[in-house]
Image (tube, grey):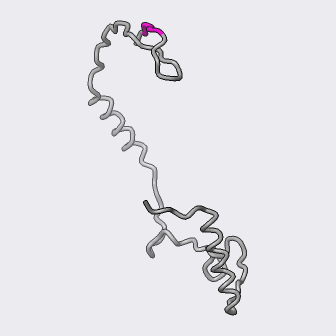
Amino acid sequence: MIKRPTKADQRRELEKQMADFLNKGGQITSVEQGASGLVNGTYNKHQFTIGQPKQTRTAVPEVLVAIDSRRRKSAPPAQQTRHRTPRRQVIYDDFGEPLRVVWVDK
């Protein structure tokens, strides 16, 4: 079975790689929080659009009322409720051994 590296192992490996990078002349620059989401110094407001302008939406309450009325008309008739008889339920302890039997109305 393959032994997976622990978090401590991963942390040590990452620190070793960073130390090697710095020893070879690498430089780490700090970036302000949130700066990676900026485009040309401002937030990208159009990231979810594909070049299309924002469309205005109009409320259509009469269409919604018609849809709701059709739903109410086509709803299946309510089923008759069956008289349910009590059923037996076994109560177990923490070790899975049966303690007692009770009757439950459902």
> What residue lies at 30% left-to-right and 34% top-to-bottom?
70
> What residue lies at 50% left-to-right and 23% top-to-bottom?
95
Q: x%, y% of residue 78?
A: 30, 19
> What residue lies at 34% left-to-right and 38% top-to-bottom?
66
Residue 13 appears in which quarter of the rendering?
bottom right
Q: In which quadrant is the C terminus drawn?
A: top left
Query: Measured along the vertical axis of the image, is residue 1 above or below residue 10?
Result: above
Q: Is the magenta stretch mostly helix, strand or loop?
A: strand
Of 77 and 60, nearer the camera is 77
* Residue farthest along the front direction in this orientation: 1
Of 94 and 44, nearer the camera is 94
In the rendered structure, does residue 101 fall within the stretch colored magenta? yes
* Residue farthest along the bottom direction in this orientation: 25
Query: Measured along the vertical axis of the image, is residue 61 above or below residue 17?
Result: above
Q: In which quadrant is the N terminus drawn?
A: bottom left
Q: x%, y% of residue 104?
A: 43, 10
Residue 81 appears in which quarter of the rendering?
top left
In the rendered structure, does residue 2 fall within the stretch colored magenta? no
> What residue lies at 42% left-to-right and 7% top-to-bottom?
103
From the viewer's perspective, is 65 left or right of 12?
left
Of 63 and 23, nearer the camera is 23
Residue 42 appears in which quarter of the rendering?
bottom right
From the viewer's perspective, is 35 left or right of 73?
right
- Count numbered badges in the picture: 0
Question: Start and end of the magenta stretch?
Answer: 100-104
Q: x%, y% of residue 69?
A: 34, 33
Q: x%, y% of residue 38?
A: 63, 76
Of 93 and 36, nearer the camera is 93
Query: Measured along the vertical axis of the image, is residue 86 above or below residue 15?
Result: above
